[in-house]
Image (cartoon, rainbow, N blue to C red):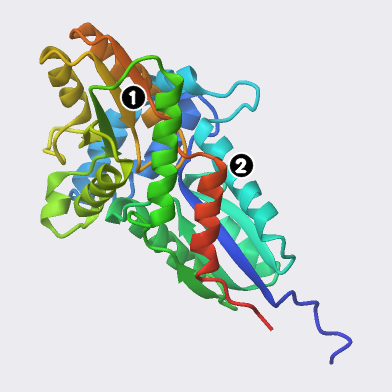
């Protein structure tokens, strides 16, 4: 029996870094495919699913892909032929692998929407001998529409496995000192590069519908906590204010809205604004196009003079150190 037993890999630990996702290209069809998966997630859109699918398939998926494609074309990395989010997620994964330096630990990445999928990567880690898998969603501030939907997909993947690995999930890290320090380092670096002093700093987080907050989602509180810690540790007279971006549809979202706030500050006479996006672990269409391009246009058109965006933590050394620290708390040595 032993001679005929199939070879089984075992004794390893997997680390799966998970980001939101990205289309495979800027083509209309790839954008539509990505948006369909993303906007079909009931954690993201909490409307009657029958009514929503009619709206989604008849109207949104026929109209929105063209607009979204134009936004992606503005920020697409032509040399690498991929979105910045995919590029930086790959670089973060490589950076972690180099620092861990342990053959019994496999570090990989997946996207909640698009490729590579969580299910495929979970299956790959299990087949390569990972008896324990650590999931690191790259969302510092927990929300049901981000971290929880990653967990949902991970659990669905486990349901397909005959030999399930043990599982650990890192839920959030909005107040982790290394995270706050990395954000402050990025702020200080950007300020040292510009030749003007910001009147204020806008901390822009991705928004969620207000009704999600009313139902008990802690996301708003985590964002406010991060901004409070930034103000306390930045040690500057420059105030950091919380705003929320990327609203979608007619319903009310968390306020104040980033675009409206930028417009308001410009009209009030503020000439110099610096924006940081603490909730985004990698630069993406929301930071590079919505804020750096659209946000700047709004500010300048309403009387502003200087507008800059702090790059996300991306593959910065202190960001990799933060991710390593988070993972090390969950590592289990397999025997």
Give the side of residue 330 with respect to residue 268, left or right: right
The residue at 28%/49% (across/down) is 229
Under circle 2, the secondary element is helix
The residue at 32%/41% (across/down) is 234
**Residue 28, image x and y in percent?**
46, 24
Disc 1: CA contacts within 10 A as few (<14), some (14-19) or many (>=20) = some
**Residue 280, image x and y in percent?**
39, 41
Disc 2: CA contacts within 10 A as few (<14), some (14-19) or many (>=20) = some
The residue at 41%/18% (across/down) is 194
Is 74 above or below relative to 241?
above
**Residue 123, image x and y in percent?**
61, 63
Number of numbered markers: 2
Depth order, front residue of 241/194: 194
**Quarter occupied by residue 217:** bottom left
Is 93 above or below relative to 166?
above
Q: Quadrant of the C terminus?
A: bottom right
Disc on res. 290: 1
The residue at 39%/20% (across/down) is 66
Quick check: can you spot residue 159? no
Q: Quadrant of the N terminus?
A: bottom right
Give the side of residue 220 with respect to residue 153, left or right: left
**Quarter occupied by residue 186:** top left
Disc on res. 91: 2
First in sequence: mark 2 or mark 1? 2
Depth order, front residue of 185/277: 185
Disc on res. 221: none
Label 2 to label 1: alpha-carbon separation: 23 Å
Under circle 1, the secondary element is helix
Give the side of residue 135 with respect to residue 222, left or right: right
Outermost residue, right side: 3
């Amino acid at each position: 029996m032993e001679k005929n037993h199939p070879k089984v890999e075992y004794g390893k630990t997997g680390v799966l870094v998970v980001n939101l996702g990205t289309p495979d290209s800027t083509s209309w069809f790839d954008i539509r495919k990505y948006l369909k998966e993303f906007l079909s997630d009931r954690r993201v859109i909490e409307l009657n699913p029958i009514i929503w699918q009619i709206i989604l398939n008849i109207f949104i998926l026929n109209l929105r892909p063209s607009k979204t494609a134009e936004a992606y074309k503005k920020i697409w990395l032509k040399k690498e032929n991929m979105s910045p989010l995919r590029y930086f997620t790959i670089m973060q994964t490589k950076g972690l692998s180099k620092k861990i330096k342990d053959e019994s630990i496999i570090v990989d990445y997946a996207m909640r929407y698009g490729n590579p999928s969580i299910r495929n990567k979970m299956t790959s880690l299990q087949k390569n001998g990972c008896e324990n898998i650590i999931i690191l969603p790259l969302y510092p501030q927990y929300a049901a529409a981000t971290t929880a939907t990653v967990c949902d997909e991970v659990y669905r993947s486990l349901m397909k496995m005959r030999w399930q690995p043990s599982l650990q999930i890192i839920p959030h890290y909005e107040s982790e000192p290394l995270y706050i320090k990395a954000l402050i380092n990025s702020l200080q670096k950007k300020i040292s590069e510009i030749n003007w002093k910001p009147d204020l700093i806008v901390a822009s987080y991705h928004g969620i519908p207000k009704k999600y907050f009313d139902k008990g989602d802690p996301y708003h509180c985590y964002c406010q906590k991060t901004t409070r810690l930034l103000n306390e540790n930045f040690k500057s007279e420059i105030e950091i204010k919380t705003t929320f971006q990327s609203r979608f549809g007619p319903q009310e979202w968390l306020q104040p809205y980033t675009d409206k706030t930028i417009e308001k500050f410009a009209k009030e006479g503020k000439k110099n604004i610096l924006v940081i996006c603490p909730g985004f672990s990698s630069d993406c269409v929301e930071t590079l196009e919505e804020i750096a391009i659209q946000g700047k246009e709004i500010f300048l058109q309403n009387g502003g003079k200087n507008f800059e965006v702090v790059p996300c933590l991306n593959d910065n050394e202190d960001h990799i150190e933060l991710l390593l620290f988070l993972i090390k708390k969950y590592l289990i040595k397999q025997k």
